[in-house]
Image (tube, grey):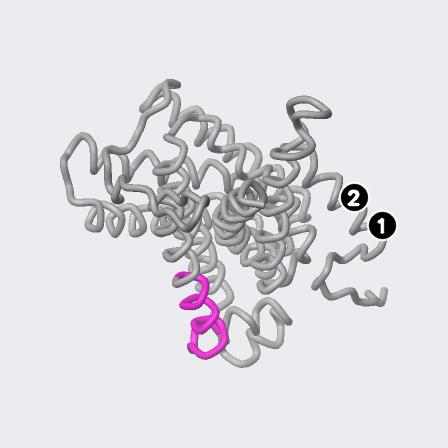
Amino acid sequence: MSFFLQLLITGVVVGSIYALVALGFVLIYKASDALNLANGELVLIGSYICLTLVAVYKIPFIIALIITLMFNALLGMAIERVVLRPLINAPVISVIMATIGLASLLAGLVHMIWGHQTKSYPPIFPSEPIRIGEIIIAPVYLWSFVIVMVLLVIFTIFFKYSKMGLAMRAVADDQMAALSMGISVKSVYAITWGIAALVAAVGGVLLGNINGVNASMATIGLAVLPVVILGGLDSIPGAIIGGFIIGIVQNLAAGYLQPIFGGGLKEVIPFIIVTIILMLKPNGLFGKGGIERV
């Protein structure tokens, strides 16, 4: 039982980070109907920036995190302005291909600047493990979960009640109607990319504190894709719930099934789940299906 609870707790923590990163996917999809396949590289850049500020320049972690979030948000807005805005009226496949090229470019820059070796954050969170009976919880897991949940609550309130959040929802529902109401769609696009890059940075910093930082962290962009498909590409609650589902199932599979079926099952199981769900619900658990008239 303690082994199960240990896997469950780890799955909840990892799933919460998946949910946060998936939020960036969903925001961009809702705004532009395109997937941002460079999301993993934004996660990686955020983690390396914060690590450099903390480890090299000895800046306190909180200040380094704030600087990192500002940098990633500006980077996301710059990407939207330079790469994506010229493609506003282009086919969706053109936007997707642009994000693939952007991912390759950002990955190359990361390799040139920081290299390929795994780098570790200096001790930031308490090192003494928390014991609850036979269950051992590393403080970095607990703090990561708390930070993610606080951010998810903040973003939920922002999207539901703030003026910009309402504008983003209006643009996602109907761009022409939003324009007729005086909403600047271009500004909403820029802010959407800024928020997506910001949450990617948070996910990268938390994962970097848990596992260290190296180029393979960018694969979280692929790992989170089943999350957004499972929850529904246009559903923010779906991204959150899907993140927890994938994180928990992935860790349980790694603990119980991977010793039987061999390595690699942990990475494959999310795609198996998504395939089954899509056979039953093609729009995901919370996605909105619709009829398009032509």
**Type of the residue with mark 2:** Thr
Residue found 39% across the figure and 63% down from its top: 150
Observer-nearest residue: 108 or 288?
288
Q: Confirm whether residue 96 shows in the render.
A: yes
Q: From the image, give the main secondary structure of the stretch colored magenta.
A: helix
Which disc, if any, is residue 76?
A: none
Which image quarter holds the C terminus?
Answer: bottom right
**Type of the residue with mark 1:** Met
Residue 260 position, x and y percent, is 71, 25
Residue 279 relative to residue 3: left or right:
right
* Residue topped by disc 1: 279
**Do labels 1 and 2 touch, CB within 8 Å?**
yes
Q: Confirm whether residue 86 shows in the render.
A: no
Position of 156 relative to 231 (above/below): below
Q: Residues within 10 Å of mark 1 (few under 14, many from 20)?
A: few
Which disc, if any, is residue 275?
A: 2
Observer-nearest residue: 197 or 58?
58
Residue found 55% across the figure and 74% down from its top: 179
Q: Residues within 10 Å of mark 2 (few under 14, many from 20)?
A: some
Q: Which residues are magenta?
A: 151-165
Which image quarter holds the N terminus?
Answer: top right
Q: Quadrant of residue 231?
A: bottom right
Residue found 41% across the figure and 35% down from its top: 44
- Secondary structure beneath dot 1 equals helix
